[in-house]
Amino acid sequence: MNKKHYLTLALALAMAGTAHADPTPDWGDKISEKEFLEAAKRSFYLNDPKEFDRLRDETLEVCNATKNRPSAEQTKAILEREQKTIVYPKDGKLYGDWKKGKIVVEDAHGGRIGYPGFADADNPKHPNGANCYACHAIDPNFPQAGNMGPPLTNYGKLRPKTDAMVKYTYDKVYNSKATNPCSLMPRYGGPKHLITPEQVADVVAFLLDPDSPVNNPPVTTK
Amino acid sequence: MKTTTKRLALGISLFAGALAATQVLASDDKFAAYRDALAGDNPGEFWIDDGKKLFFEKRGPKKASLEQCDFGLGPGVLKGAYAQLPRYFKDTNKVETLEGRILTCMEKLQGIKPEEAVKMTYLNAAEEDSRPDDLTKIATYIAAQSNGMKFDVKPRNAQEQHALELGKKMFWRRQGAMDLACADCHANTQGKQLRGVDLPDMTDIKTAGKVMTAFPAYVLKDSNVRGQWWRNERCVLAMRLPWLKTGSEIDAALTLYMLNFASQSEEKIQVPGIKPRA
């Protein structure tokens, strides 16, 4: 980091501290859930009434009502409920193939719906991806990463590859809300979300495997 | 030679990627230089000409033009109309966006059903298969009549106040298959990026002003002009929510909520703006 970088960083920090137009922690509290859902029924086009379910979720309802700060009691209820949703691969292996995991992590396909005939709606026959780079830096060779979540580069290098770590990683990817009630990270596993138990296991391997590019220095091009 | 060039290009793109990851504030600055270079020859200007033609053309079963359409300042008054939308309209008892109001007038004056009028706009919202559509052309023409003016959108009555609150709810409510609220990516997120792309903080007055005064904007990735509704829908799509209807209650509420911030900035409307991808 040279001087200019430090200046940029200082500026970023200063800007992060500036007052916002809406300093009150008001998330539209004057509008009730019922009122919002009625407006939503009039505002969203539904190909199938089931699509409306995406606007309702028991856990998010608590997170929204408490502005992501659920009480101890609410936290307990969320963790218990979300823990129950986690499904493991049929063969019992929580650690899959890192090469397949690499594809799941990069791919952004999945879950998009739309107006009939809309070209960008996702093809249900194509396997979904988790688009992890939207928020995390992971494989150091991947050029575009977001910074909404912590960097996961060297994830396996920094952690022991124990059964407990494999399970922790699996659970975190499958359902982040099973360990952190209102985690910013989306829940990825299961039919309501994007990927299958087998795909989650592949992502686990991609993060933890010593041969995975995640845990190796970037490949230099000469 | 070819291989060398290829490698060099790859090296540069990797370097640029690494740079984007470390210098979070710099990436939009780079685009700004490109935007300035293109500003004199913005391809979006064609949408204004096409929109003007469509506005005055006698169309629909009633063979009428849109000249008598009232955008809130009286029938046919276009200067400054965009700067005060969305607003509440007595005749429809709705808060309407520019696009929503155009749909209302197309139905009333020309007899064109809204479902028919938006069809092409919906299909063309795709990145993969994007062609110009009439609604966006008309919207761009009307919006351009407010160029050089500041947005003046604030709740003036109970209906607009309700829309502001509903927009706030839509903006902050976590929902959809990704468990995300608009706010998770667009509030208090200065310096944050999504897959290498800067996230505008829409609760920051200056940023909201910069973003909102640029739409309808020419989007380079799509080679198409995109309006306010499209901007909302692209995020809604990424959140894996159902399809947001153009000019609907929530579309208008969300637009009004963000324009209320933009109106407090010194930024002036300058459309069509130029955007790299969104």
Image (cartoon, coloured by chain):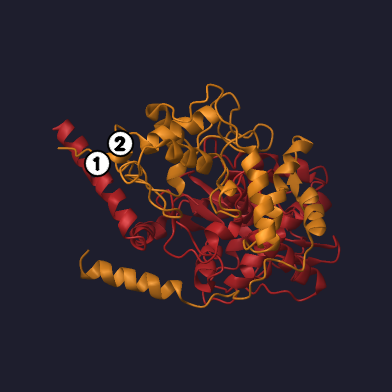
Query: Which one is nearer the viewer's eye here, A148 or B156?
Result: A148
Whichever of labels 2 and 1 marks the residue nearer the N terminus, that label is: 2
| Image mark for residue A213 | 2
Query: Which one is nearer the viewer's eye here, A121 or B149?
Result: A121
Does A92 sit above or below residue A167? above
Element under label 1? loop
Can you tell which chain is drawn red?
B
Q: What's the residue at 77%, 46% (across, down)? A: B114
Query: Which one is nearer the viewer's eye here, A114 or B98?
Result: A114
Q: What's the residue at 30%, 36% (across, down)? A: A213
Are labels 2 and 1 on one chain?
Answer: yes
**Contact (CB < 8 A) between labels 2 and 1?**
yes
Instruction: Bin the neighbour count of mark 2 within 10 Å (Cα to Cα): few under 14, some 14-19, many 20 and up.
Output: many
Q: Color of chain A here? A: orange
Q: Chain of mark 2?
A: A
Which kind of residue does numbered mark 1 sit on? Pro
Element under label 2? helix
Instruction: Bin the neighbour count of mark 1 within 10 Å (Cα to Cα): few under 14, some 14-19, many 20 and up.
Output: few
Which kind of residue does numbered mark 2 sit on? Pro
- In the displayed orientation, state which residue is furthest to the top: A91
Q: Position of residue B264 (x, y in %)?
A: 58, 77
